[in-house]
Image (cartoon, coloured by chain):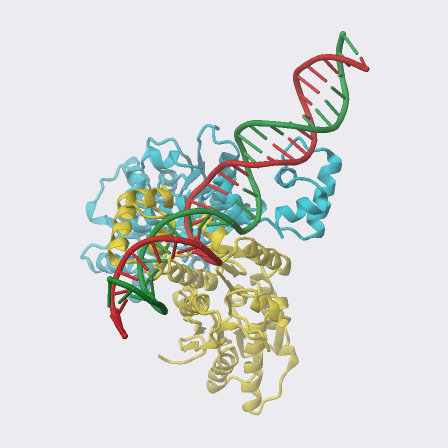
Chain colours: A cyan, B yellow, C red, D green
Amino acid sequence: MKIKDIAEAAGVSTATVSRVLSGKQNVRPAVRDKVMAVAQELNYTPNRAARSLRSRRSSSIGLIVADIQNPFFASLSRAVEDIAQANDYSVILCNTDENPEKEKMYLELMQNENAAGIILAPTGELARNFPQELADSGPMVVIDRKVNNISVDSVVIDNFDAGQTLTRHLLDHGYRRIAGLFGANSVTGQERRSGFEAALRAAGLDLDQELIIEIAAKEVEGHAAVSRLLEAENPPEAILTSSGLLATGAFRAIRDKEIAVPQKIAFATFDESPWTTMIRPAITVIEQPTYAIGQTAGEMLFKRIKDPERPTRQVVLSSKLIVRQSCGAHS
Amino acid sequence: MKIKDIAEAAGVSTATVSRVLSGKQNVRPAVRDKVMAVAQELNYTPNRAARSLRSRRSSSIGLIVADIQNPFFASLSRAVEDIAQANDYSVILCNTDENPEKEKMYLELMQNENAAGIILAPTGELARNFPQELADSGPMVVIDRKVNNISVDSVVIDNFDAGQTLTRHLLDHGYRRIAGLFGANSVTGQERRSGFEAALRAAGLDLDQELIIEIAAKEVEGHAAVSRLLEAENPPEAILTSSGLLATGAFRAIRDKEIAVPQKIAFATFDESPWTTMIRPAITVIEQPTYAIGQTAGEMLFKRIKDPERPTRQVVLSSKLIVRQSCGAHS
DNA sequence: AATCAAAATGTAATCGATTACATTTTGATT
DNA sequence: AATCAAAATGTAATCGATTACATTTTGATT
């Protein structure tokens, strides 16, 4: 079933059929209706490869994230797919594992696919050194990680603010020796660390480098770091982690040593996950608007596809402090 | 940069370039090397739309699941993407939300994309009434849900066995009044229920229909059902749930009423998730080999793509009972 | 009715690969 | 050296849509 069949059945040329089906102007209503009816009747569906080849733009968008197994990206991906589907586009999923080479490979793949656009959570390396020409190579929305001095659409959260807010919450409950675990390779982690440090300084505290820990954002690393902290001669009064995976490792280390939370040590983290509400005490967290990030990025991408000339914009979404019992708050 | 450019630069025809690049036989090594070198030098990458259009097969595979936000599917998707990438294919992600209409729409989309193959977690409705012609429409691997009497590749787990094993574990710890919560619309849930019932019967117990609960596999449903059970005049001694979402709801209901686990009520469930190990007592679970399911399905799909004539097979992977403290076991 | 710009429609080229078929080359055998 | 099947390579058609350009139709204006 191809456009030529429709054309013959409707008694018009393939060009007219194409115009009708792609919603172009300049077709008489009678012709339009006839073609539509025939297409419907013959159950026509377009061949996407042919369309893509000729028009030099496919109806796929690329979604490049670190790892779909991370609930943050899973939720975001779901939002992107919902938006894509509403626009009759499909989503090609790519996992970089924070590996710049895989990222490069996928970006090239998107070129070969003539992807209509890309939603990209860049690796730390790329985010720090983002070429303008990549941003200009086609419709693209950068998510999660800020890229500086580059004109590109992006959706991020207020990491600095959130880091500050979460730290201030701990300070407000009287904790002074607060350890912070941050993802070393991510721009996001660094911004959160800045917020953390700003809050401590604003409270008139000196920064203790022993308590500012930068590690790969992995569960084992979080576990190892917190195990070390707890065995130190002067352990911290509170621990803050900048990502869900670090939190899982960190909290397991606390559990392993059977240290009472919040009595002996307070705990707070970025990223909501099922366990933070299931355990007792429930964990105080900064919740990121994961679905909204994906949704916003998807919407921005389609606006960009429709209008490549529109000015680029950076959207900063707010995250939310959810106070529970792990820092000693009563609620 | 297209094949014609390579052909001119290497002094051969486009046909020869195509043969070299697609690894066909019947090219002299000298010519092959020359073409390869030129392609490398010009940094050639193939246009996938053109390839797909002519060869009537794209280098994308479709992955159709209920919801990528479900960790089971996220992990599985990751495996599929890893395998696809190793084979130089890309993955198109589709979420059906268990909605047969969305599923149909995506299956049609895969046709229009000329997808090289499909990995499909069918909705309950489709699984119960799977047309042979769909199975024959192209390379396809069905996952998670068994489809009966149809010749199609599939990867499932031993749901009946697992249901029986988990129930037997509860029986072995002396529980007799055991409630079971099962997903009503899934083949999977029904098989697990059968295992549950078989174990009870084998122990010489009568089935109490009040304690066999079939509901939509959603957190709220699990919460409501367990709340009701706990308020009954004769509450169960143990609760078993057949999916991660039901478990979360069910366990929240137990928490809400502050009932001691396992002293007042024992608890066990299908599906490992972070909270089942983070809470105290940790939860006894049946862990599904999620990554292995995706990996196996991916490998089977590529074998099928390479050899459409190979006999179909059903692979049953084993799930694993992980004993923790929520049923009173000491370990 | 003639005129003519705008609207509608058609013809044929095109996107970049693969592949059917044709032709040339190779190399073993006589 | 002649023969000839097999191997290597080339030519040109093809996949199914979009689109540049050409042509025809429409309908307002004179």
Residue drawn 45% across the image and 67% down it: B301
Q: Residue at x 46, y 48 (%)?
A: B49
> Where in the figure is residue A160, as x and y percent of width and height?
35, 38
**For this view, does B42 lie left or right of residue B138?**
left
In this rendering, the answer to whether A250 lies above or below A6 is below
Find residue B123 and report its image quarter: bottom right
| Percent x, y of residue B145 | 54, 71
Q: Is residue A272 visible?
A: no
Q: Position of residue B253 (x, y in %)?
A: 55, 65
Residue lying farthest to the bottom in this orientation: B204
In this rendering, the count of numbered labels is 0
x, y percentage for residue B236? 57, 78
Position of B55 compared to B127: left or right?
Answer: left
Q: Is residue A306 left or right of residue A207?
A: right
Q: Is residue A164 visible?
A: yes
Closer to us: A147 or A22: A22
Position of B315 relative to A268 (above/below): below
B91 to A32, vertically: above or below: below
* Residue at 31%, 37% in the rendered image: A130
